[in-house]
Each structure stands twice: as C-alpha cells, then as structure tokens.
C-alpha cells in the first residue's frame, strides 16, 4: 500500500479512501466500490479468526480514529481490546435512564482497566420524549454516538449474531450505513456461553444485575429480568414490539 501525502500527515492510500468516505458522510454517500471490496476481503479473512485478530487489525488500521462503544453489560470486548491497545478510547452512552448498578459498574470497570473513557449525554429535548419512543433512543443514544463517531473512521462493537434475528448476518468487518464509518464486530460469532466462559476463565467482574436475571441490560424503564429458559432479550422493551435502539442496522 503506497503512502499518500496529505498536508503534514502521511497516510496510506486505504486511509485516504476512508478519509474521503468520512468527509462524504453528510451527503449520505455509500462506501466507494474499492473500499467495500476491501472490507469484504478482510471480513472473509477474519470470519473464523479469534476475536483479538479483528481488534488487532482495527487498531493497526485506524489507530486513534477507532473507538470502542460499550454498553457495560459485560466486559469481554473491553478486556480483549485493552490487551491489544491499553489506551483505546471507550465510549459509553449515558442515557440518564440507566440502572444505578450499571453506572456503578462503569466506574468499577473504568478503575480496573484505567480506561480512557468518553461518556456521552443526551441531546437537547430528550426529556420531551417518553421512554420507548424511537425519538428517545435517537436523542439519548444515536445522536450522541454520532457526534463521537464524527471524528472517527471506525468503531468496535460487542454485537453478536445470537443477540437478535436482526443481527443474524452481522459481519466481523463491514461498512456501517448508520454512522458512515467502518464497523468491526469481533464477537459476531460468539454465543452467550462463549461470553460466560470467557468471563469465568479470566476471573472478570460481572454486572451486578446479571445474577438477578437481567440477561440483556439497557435503560431501566424498559428492561426487566427474564425467566429461566426465556430469550435473553425478551426483557428489553417487553410488549412494545421494539427490538433495537437504532445503533445497529445489522
Ligand atoms: S431504551 Fe428507553 S429510555 Fe433508553 S434511550 Fe431508548 S427509549 Fe429512551
């Protein structure tokens, strides 16, 4: 890959292409054909590789233009990522509707790893929209994250295909049409049992609500514990028909 000189910053051809993608986001332009092909090739290469390989690729490729978005439901992705880059930026969207246990867990994990943590806050007008409405998630999660990703070229997520039917075909690496950046899902192929096994094997802290039956944890008003044998995400927005908050198109 030949380096391309841009002002005082030397960047590679691939990075230059991503930079142009970044600049064209506001116009809603899809990724250029070359970039889409490149991401597809990388996804094929990483599809069956350990999660840490996808993180290594993303850190090497994007450096400080990469951010890890964490819900702090569990710490697997954070644990894997800080082993690759101890100074990786982690972002948590504080919707101001989280359980106090979640906020305490964020503090615990931040201290444990010495995280470089960015905490977003809801945008103006969020209080006018009741929990459960699409606009509430938009103003408390999607728009705050969009502001963070506006300075980035890629993000890491803990999305798993088993999370929901809408995520069943999520790639490890792909283009994110919601935010106009590259999206890396190192845990895409993991199961819930893989997550539990990793937490146990590495002696990692567990969100305090998990032992109480909260297997998928979001905002307090729309999260309930699930019964044994019930789908983990049945406790999110129960009875509303809503399944996603808008952060993940796939
Ligand atoms: S989960 Fe509920 S309270 Fe949280 S941002 Fe979405 S709609 Fe609002």
Image (spheres, grey):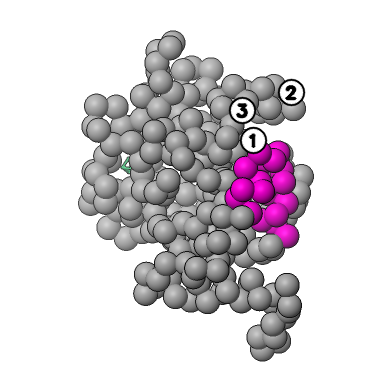
- In the rendered image, the vertical position of residue 13 relative to residue 152, given as above or below: below
Under circle 3, the secondary element is helix
Under circle 1, the secondary element is helix
Label 2 to label 1: alpha-carbon separation: 11 Å
Magenta region includes residue 112:
no
Quadrant holding the N terminus: bottom right
The residue identified by callout 3 is 195
For disc 1, does the CB lie below 8 Å from ligand 1?
no
Q: Name the image quarter holding residue 8.
A: bottom right
- In the rendered image, the vertical position of residue 32 relative to residue 190, given as above or below: below
Quadrant of the image where one finds ligand 1: top left
Is residue 213 visible from the viewing direction of this image? Answer: yes
User: Sequence-wise, which precedes: disc 2 or disc 1?
Assistant: 1
Query: Residue shown at 44%/75% (left/top)?
Result: 24
Label 3 to label 1: alpha-carbon separation: 7 Å
Under circle 2, the secondary element is helix
Q: Position of residue 46 (x, y in %)?
A: 66, 46
The residue identified by callout 2 is 201
Q: Magenta span covers which residues?
A: 42-60
CB under 8 Å between discs 3 and 1: yes
Query: Residue shown at 74%/27% (left/top)?
Result: 202
The residue identified by callout 1 is 76
Camera-nearest residue between 111 and 89: 89
Is residue 72 visible from the viewing direction of this image? Answer: no
């Amino acid at each position: 890959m030949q380096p391309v000189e841009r002002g005082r910053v030397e960047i590679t051809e691939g990075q230059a292409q991503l930079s142009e993608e970044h600049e064209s986001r506001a116009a809603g332009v899809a990724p250029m054909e070359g970039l889409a092909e490149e991401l597809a090739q990388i996804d094929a290469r990483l599809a069956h590789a350990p999660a840490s390989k996808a993180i290594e690729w993303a850190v090497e490729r994007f450096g400080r233009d990469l951010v890890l978005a964490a819900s702090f439901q569990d710490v697997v992705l954070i644990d894997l990522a800080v082993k690759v880059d101890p100074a990786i930026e982690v972002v948590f969207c504080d919707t101001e509707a989280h359980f106090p246990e979640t906020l305490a867990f964020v503090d615990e994990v931040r201290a444990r790893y010495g995280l470089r943590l960015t905490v977003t806050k809801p945008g103006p007008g969020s209080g006018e929209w009741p929990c459960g409405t699409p606009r509430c998630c938009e103003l408390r999660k999607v728009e705050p994250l969009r502001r963070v990703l506006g300075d980035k070229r890629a993000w890491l997520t803990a999305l798993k295909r088993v999370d929901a039917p809408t995520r069943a075909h999520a790639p490890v690496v792909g283009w994110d049409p919601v935010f106009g950046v590259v999206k890396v899902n190192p845990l895409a192929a993991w199961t819930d049992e893989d997550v539990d096994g990793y937490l146990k094997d590495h002696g990692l802290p567990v969100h305090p609500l998990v032992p109480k039956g909260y297997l998928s944890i979001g905002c307090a008003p729309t999260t309930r514990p699930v019964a044994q044998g019930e789908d983990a995400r049945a406790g999110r927005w129960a009875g509303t028909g809503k399944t996603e908050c808008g952060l993940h198109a796939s």
